[in-house]
Image (cartoon, rainbow, N blue to C red):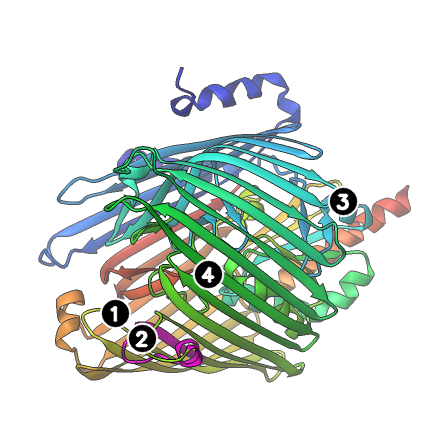
Amino acid sequence: MNLKNSPLLLIIPLFFIAAADIRISGSNHAEYWVFVDKELDTSNYKEHLEDKLKLSVNYGDITLKGVLFLWSPSLSVQEKLNYLDYAAIYSKDAVNILYGTYYTTFGRGLALNAFLDEDFRIDNSLYGVKVDFKYLGSQLTLLSGEPRCIFFEENKYKIKNEEHTSDQIRGINFNTKLIPKTTLGSRYVRINQTTDLTPKAFTELFGGDIDFTIGPFDAYFEYARQWGSDDVIGGRVRGDGILFTTSFATPGLGISCQFMDYNDIGFGNPGYRYNEPPTPIKSGISVNRGLDEVGYGVSFIVSPLDFLTLELDHNKISTHDETVNKFKEIATISDNMDGVLEHVAKMTIYTTYDLEINGGVERVLKQGIELPIEKKIETKPNIELTYNFGSFFIETGYEHNFISSDTSDYYDHAAFFSIGKPELFVFTLRYERRNRIPEWLVEKYGDETAWPLAELSLDLTHRHNLRIRVGAEKGGLICSGGVCRFEEPLRGVKAVLTSIF
Amino acid sequence: MKKLLLIPILILYLSAQEIDFNVAPDFNLIDIDGNTVYLDSLLETGPVFISFWALWCTMCIKELDAIKPYYDELDSIGVNFLAISEDKMRSVPQVKPFARSKKWQYTVLLDPENMMRDLYNVRTMPTSFIIEQNKNIIFIHQGYKPGDEEIIVNKLYELVMKEFGHESEE
């Protein structure tokens, strides 16, 4: 019997054991879109329907979880993605045993990072067995699993590692807090790929970390090494990654700094990674996800007065450049590098109980990131006001985005107005315009220059929220945690129903 | 495609029946100072308010800022506040400096593998829960709109009054 295809057999008997002691909970997220396809004329529409139902059943020390995902688009080439994930978990005292689909991160992700980001629609899971033992402030994790990387791009869900879903990942991770105020970690991950040219070849990632706290100071250092097989020429290739973060936190003031240097530590392929070395960039951009990157970040946040918060960020990541000295390589982006330099300044003022003002400026330089243009600088000032009156509130804001690139300069600007009532609704009107369209944008996003949008968010009950969006969305590069995608422009209607039970 | 529409409709119908299958799942998590926090231990001292938030979630931060003025009074009558950060491992170093700079007095917990988000079936950020001492989840709130904090705070006062009332009857 194939248990992977018969998870219901695991769930049904539980209902008959002791109904009174069973705890059931879950959620459902449904989306329905009707939109004009850019390749079709306006009388032709496409549809997108997706639903994700999560159900969790707990009885004593045993928990069963199921996720049913259905995606049914009306595409000219029929592509669908339907799957049923499940996990059976036994958890008692110091032991936790899981069989099924799971997510886990070793350290900060330099060696292994199987994660789910539902907001960004990325699902990097493992299917197999995971065992955790916890004892005296220490934790040992053993795992074995097959990876599956699902990603949403060009309005389609795709299994990015389709040819590698039968790869085997084995791992061991150990953390201990036996030394006061200090955590030590060590790990080993081995990936056996079925498509390696040399059948006995495999890839190993291993490393360790130390994390310590002294008063308001925290510091964390992680090192990882990859020993991999070369698909083309055979033999072993080596990569290294280091990550150092430190912070100072006291009421009213927080400072954090990070530094990273990655050389061939990213493992997977350009479309997916089994590990995901962190990027310092707030907007989530990385250069090549751990293949050849060096960067740092400094973040400063202060609330000198109860009604005022200031936030400053200075972050950079780029490829290495051996033609400049080490300091310049870390601190700047030379002409030979691909990279991102980001500056963010934000301010929040609570003038009275009823009025809040948020304002800021963000400047991002991208070099070799958004092809076909080589260099792009975006400068985005913005302001937002929120005002409560009676049982209603209004929110309004304006943002301007000056874009200067090696081929052309242009700007986008947008204004929005919202009115809402707590626990009932928010109605938003947004209008965005572009002053002119550079040629490279036309090829990618069409020749639109205006994007009007109306959105209604309704709290049907405490547990059900319905959002209906009508109009146009601009699209563009969006990123999260170092992973980026080009969001398709969209004209049409989107309805999203979220339920929790 | 039409069959797919049946799922959200079924969910709406089922939850409209007000079936009470909401007992708060147990958990223990590490806070930003490295201490382990157990739900069971907190419930021994009073009801628990949980808010799921993240550094990237503007509305989550607005919600926690909006509840801040009520913290001292509710804390003094036994309400426990948990702000569970759903930031991934890569953002964990920024959580403590951010929370401290905001002068939040809530217990800020770290959940970088999003196990709690999964355990409590959170799909929208922020989502908040109020758990009474007998472990029943009596209130779930998805999203945040200015003014929602008053509804949450009133619910907490109501709950504390109800529990005090029960004690005095006993």
Quarter of the image that includes the N terminus of chain A: top left
Mark 4–mark 1 distance (CA, rounded to whole Å): 20 Å
Rendered view: A263 above or below A62: below
Residue A18: give its label: none
Query: What chain letter is assigned to the residue under label 3?
Result: B
Locate residue A282, reporting x and y percent.
Answer: 45, 69
Query: Would you say B32 lies left or right of A231 here?
Result: right
Callout 2 touching callout 3 (CB < 8 Å): no
Earlier along the polypeptide chain: callout 4 or callout 2?
Answer: 4
Kind of residue indicated by mark 2: Lys
Q: Chain of mark 4?
A: A
Amino acid on which disc 4 is placed: Pro
The residue carrying mark 3 is B133
Q: Position of residue B118 (x, y in %)?
A: 53, 44
In this rendering, do the residues under marks 2 and 3 share a single chain? no
Amino acid identity at mark 1: Glu
Please state the extent of the stretch shown in magenta in the rendering.
A326-343
Which residue corresponds to the image point at 66% horizontal and 33% vertical from the top-left?
A95
Task: Please name the residue shown 18% across and 83% down the image.
Answer: A408
Instruction: Residue under label 1, please give it.
Output: A370
For label 4, the crowd category at 10 Å Cα-Cα, with few meaning under 14, some 14 to 19 and many 20 or more, is: many
Label 1 to label 2: alpha-carbon separation: 7 Å
The residue carrying pointer 3 sits among few (fewer than 14), some (14 to 19) or many (20 or more) residues within 10 Å by Cα, namely some
